[in-house]
Amino acid sequence: MRRTTSLILILGLSCLLFMGLKLEIDKASRQKIPGSSIIYVPSGKYLKTATFGFSSLMADIVYIWAIQYFGNLAIPDKFDHFVHIFSIISDLDPRYVDPYEVGALIALYDTKDVSLAIKLLDMGFAKNPDLWIFPLEAGHYAQLYKKDFPLAREYYKKAMDIPGAPDIVKRLYANAAFKTMDVKTAWETWLEVYETATDERVKKIASNHLYNIKATVDIQGLRSVLEKYKAKYGRYPDKLSDIVTAGLLPYIPKDYDQKDYGYNPKTGDVKTAVIPWKR
Amino acid sequence: MTIKVIALNTFKEAIRDRILYLLLFFAALSILVSRVLALLTVGDRAKVIKDVGLASISFFGALMAILIGTGLVYKEIEKRTIFTLISKPMRRHEFLLGKFFGLVLTLLVMLVLMSVIFLALVFFHTSTVEWKLLLAILYIFIELILITAVAILFSSFSTPILSSLFSLCFYLIGHFSWSLETLIKKIPAGLLRVLAQIVYTILPDLENFNFKTEVVHGLTIPPRVLLYSVAYGLLYTVFILTLAVLVFRRRDFI
């Protein structure tokens, strides 16, 4: 009995002591190189072999680790291996969508590197050509942060061609086409959106864009003719119909709603009667 | 004295075990394969050799401790040799401690063999004997001592398969328990947090013996951490062994 009591005492005492020691060890800061090991892995392909069929689980682990790693403000050069780390996850589990998207967000907001974000989304799209989300997001980033509408248009087109892509992709594509001044494609696409839309709100959006495209083309044409008129007569005409009388235009175009454009004879400015988005 | 006799007998018994040599073979193979892996990498090849080598020593050492340790006591019961032993003027804790020290001695010999292969490979690659790697190996040994105690504990009341599973779980928990700290930070202050904190401090933290990264990268390790880690390992071992003695004392062999 006494021996049992002694043993229980030893048990309790050793437990208390190692618990106390653990807390003490935790207080001491050990020098660490977070992620120091992973950068030496040549690629996820080799790591995949080493996971013995648990590559998806390993992808989760590396991804979770990556989130902590890139969230650590104490590592100044953490982005040096950014693409490498995410390509490891991509090789381990190519269908894992989150790392591409979250990685792109990290690249965008932490490194302010839009091209890097797009590169990551490209990686996701290369591995998942059936997922429209990657070209859609890449197009979105190109449009919003690079103001590169031709590039955005290219991505929207890729997304649009994938079955199951949401309707908004077509609208974004039409808008990007208009921004690159491909008015023909923009008109045709918005018209298609208008004709196929079942939602009144979407119909209205498409109609506004169609109004805007027509107005832009008409106003551009009218401005050019008005400049010719000014070159010939030394002033802008008093009213728009004067350019028809002068034989410079067969007729004055009307806006999408068959209304006349507004005209200022002093400045030669031509405007729509209403703001296109407030029709 | 009795402990010494049993320990030496256990050592002789363990080194005759074929599993030990099989594991040693795979450990050596794994250490040597690190050379091939190093060829595939971009950057510091010696680093890969050291990483894979130390990981192999740690992993196979743990396997040796678990696979041999879990069968030690059970075999005596299964083969009924325990009846002969306990009929001698010997206390049960002496029997258990003898088994423990015998296996620790076996592991020490195995660890020395693996270390020689590992250091030779590193020497072949860097043309220097990197003695600092021995520090990481020393702490691997402390970790193995603790795992041996755990294997003996489970072996004293369970079958080898179950004991191996339990010990393996202990090993995994030991290496992942540090992540509980992150969880605790997210738990709002209160009873649940206190409970989580208690669980966190009781659970084994085998990362306290993991100095592989620091040693490979040549980072300085605070002497306090080194000292506390040794004390932590030894105290945890005492705790587990006391528990094992308590369990073993209650077993009825008749």
Image (spheres, coloured by chain):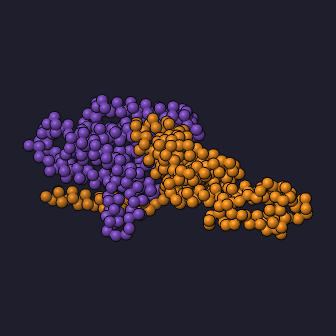
The colour chain B appears in is purple
Front residue (pair A63, B170): A63
Q: Which residue sits at x=32%, y=33%? A: B20
Residue A142 to residue B73: above or below: below
Left or right position of B155 against A76? left
Judged left or right of residue A12, residue A200 is: right
Quadrant containing the N terminus of chain A is bottom left
Taking the spot 85% from the left edge, 55% from the top edge, the residue there is A247
Extreme residue in the front direction: A245
**Residue A203 drawn above or below residue B142:** below
* A196 versus B74 height, above or below: below
* Location of residue A7 in the rendering, given as x and y in whole percent from the top left corner: 21, 57
The spot of residue B59 in percent (x, y) is 39, 40
Residue A180 picture location, percent across and down: 69, 51
B223 over A134 or under it: above or below: below
Compared across the picture, whether A13 is left or right of B230 comes to: left
Q: Residue at x 53, y 40 (%)?
A: A129
Residue found 8% across the figure and 43% down from its top: B254
Q: Nearer the viewer, residue B36 or B104?
A: B36
Chain shown orange: that is A
Q: Position of residue A200 (x, y in %)?
A: 52, 59
Q: Residue furthest left?
A: B254
